[in-house]
C-alpha cells in the first residue's frame, strides 16, 4: 500500500483494488499505517483519501544508513584480519 501511495493521493477504494482481502482488513491495515504515522487520511464527502507521510520513512532510512556504515566498517575489518591471518605462516 505504501508503494502505491508513492504515485500520489488515492481513495481507499483505489488503494485497495489490487489486494484480495476484505474491506475490514483493508481498514485495519490503514489504521495501523496511520497510527505509525506513515499515512494520513482525509475525508471528502463519502470518500476517504490517503496520502503517504514520508518523514517517518526518511527517519528510518537514516537510522538504517548509520548502522549500515557501522557494520560495513566492522565487516571490512574482519575481512582484513582474515586476509592477514591466512598470509601469516603457521608457527
Image: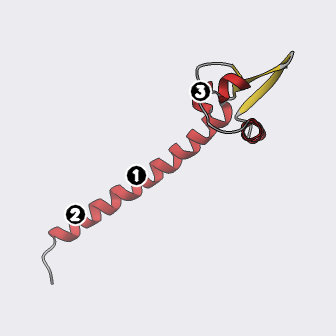
Instruction: Choose top left, top right, bottom left or bottom right for residue 18.
Output: top right
- SS at circle 1: helix
Give the Cα distance between marks 2 and 3: 46 Å
Q: Indicate which disc, 2 or 3, sits on the residue closer to the N terminus.
A: 3
Please give the label number shown on residue 83. Answer: 2
Determine whether 45 is above or below 3 in the image: above
| Residue drawn at x 72%, y 31% as measured from the top left | 39
Which label was assigned to residue 72?
Answer: 1
The structure residue drawn at horizontal position 15% and vertical position 68%, both measured from the top left corner, is 87
- The residue that disc 3 covers is 4
Please tell me whether mark 2 or mark 3 is closer to you in this view.
Answer: 3
| Secondary structure state at the residue bearing disc 3 | helix
The chosen color scheme is secondary structure
Against 35, residue 84 (above or below) is below
Quadrant of the snapshot with the C terminus: bottom left
Instruction: Kindly identify the residue that appears in the image at 71 percent across and 24 percent down.
Output: 13
Which is more N-terminal, label 1 or label 2?
Answer: 1
Q: Badge 2: how crowded within 10 Å, few (<14), some, or many (20+)?
A: few
Amino acid at each position: 500500500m505504501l508503494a502505491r501511495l508513492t504515485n500520489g493521493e488515492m481513495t481507499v477504494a483505489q488503494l485497495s483494488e489490487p489486494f484480495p482481502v476484505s474491506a475490514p482488513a483493508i481498514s485495519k491495515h490503514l489504521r495501523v499505517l496511520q497510527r505509525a504515522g506513515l499515512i494520513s487520511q482525509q475525508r471528502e464527502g463519502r470518500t476517504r483519501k490517503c496520502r503517504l507521510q514520508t518523514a517517518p520513512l526518511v527517519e528510518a532510512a537514516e537510522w538504517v544508513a548509520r548502522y549500515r556504515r557501522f557494520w560495513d566498517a566492522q565487516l571490512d575489518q574482519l575481512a582484513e584480519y582474515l586476509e592477514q591471518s591466512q598470509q601469516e605462516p603457521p608457527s
